[in-house]
Amino acid sequence: MADSIKIRATLKGNDGEVRLLIPHPMESGLRHDPAGQTIAAHYITAITLSLNGRPVLEGGLGSAVSANPLFAFQLQDVRAGDKVGVAWLDNRGQRGSAEAVFDAS
Amino acid sequence: MRRRAFLQAFGSATVLAPLIGTGLLQPRGALAAEGGRAAFEARAALEALRLIGAGGAEQNAALTIKAPEIAENGAAVPIEVISAIPGTTRLAVLVDKNPFPLVAQFNFGPEVMPRLQTRIKMAESSRLRLVASAGGRFYTVFRDVKVTVGGCGA
């Protein structure tokens, strides 16, 4: 799962945009399968963004973030070659991470 | 100062210690100082607001929620939230009528602009709230979104 995060870092001047698509069911624990059984909750609870290894953003998520969460964040004072990383943790203790480098567009 | 405040808000040492040398963050489900997971388990928006410390948030037109007026698919409603309030360090998104109204909250370091795009689940037509924290004060803005087909069990 961790390997399939899509992360795109684009640079316009000194402004960087990071777009993320994280494959994850984001199951709320409120739904039922066709047999009437509750589908167990399984969702990302925390996400962090780092710039060149330093933390720059941390998010707490609930189960109402859509399946396969998509995020776009805007960074300032970014240069070509800067490295952005994302890491997530879900309610079952599973983790994933990915990195990308800002390229001049 | 901003960076220090940011790190304190994260509970610094315990969160950051494992990162040294890894180049990657290891999320630990922090944000404990802001109500932790309890706020995400609140079943009413006002209770979630209280738990994140934003019970007395003032309305402020410098906050923007971009969302469709009518969302056809409640399972994935695209939103963009933006704070133009200087010194914004935190944003939270709530959907009043969801079973668990608090959708997400983010702490922003000085390198990240207080805005983001994402997709959220909406169980039914509801008020969306954006809450921003800046300089120790809380601000909010509302927007109503009609949902044609609710995101089941949002």
Image (cartoon, rainbow, N blue to C red):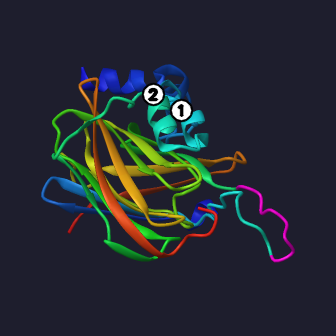
Whether residue B35 can be seen here: yes
The residue that appears at 87% across and 74% down in the rendered structure is A35
Disc 1 secondary structure class: loop
Give above or below for B40 relative to A105. above
Indicate the quadrant where residue B134 lies: top left
Query: Of the residues shown, which amino acid type is indicated by label 2?
Result: Phe
Q: Which residues are magenta?
A: A34-41
Along the horizontal axis of the image, is A65 left or right of B132? Answer: right
**A68 w.r.t. A49: above or below:** below
The residue sitting at 26% across, 45% down in the picture is B114
Left or right, B30 with respect to B114, comes to right
Residue found at x 50% / y 38% = B48
Query: Could you say which is closer to the camera, residue B118 or residue B46?
Result: B46
Q: Nearer the viewer, residue A82 or A74?
A: A74
Q: Is A37 within the magenta?
A: yes
Residue picked out by circle 2: B10
- Residue B99 drawn at (x, y percent): 59, 53
Residue beneath disc 1: B30
One can see residue A73 in this view: no
x%, y% of residue B39? Answer: 54, 36
State yes or no: residue B29 in magenta. no
Q: Quadrant of the N terminus of chain B?
A: top left
**Looking at the image, residue A96 lies above or below residue A54:** below
User: Which quarter of the picture shows residue B139?
Assistant: top left
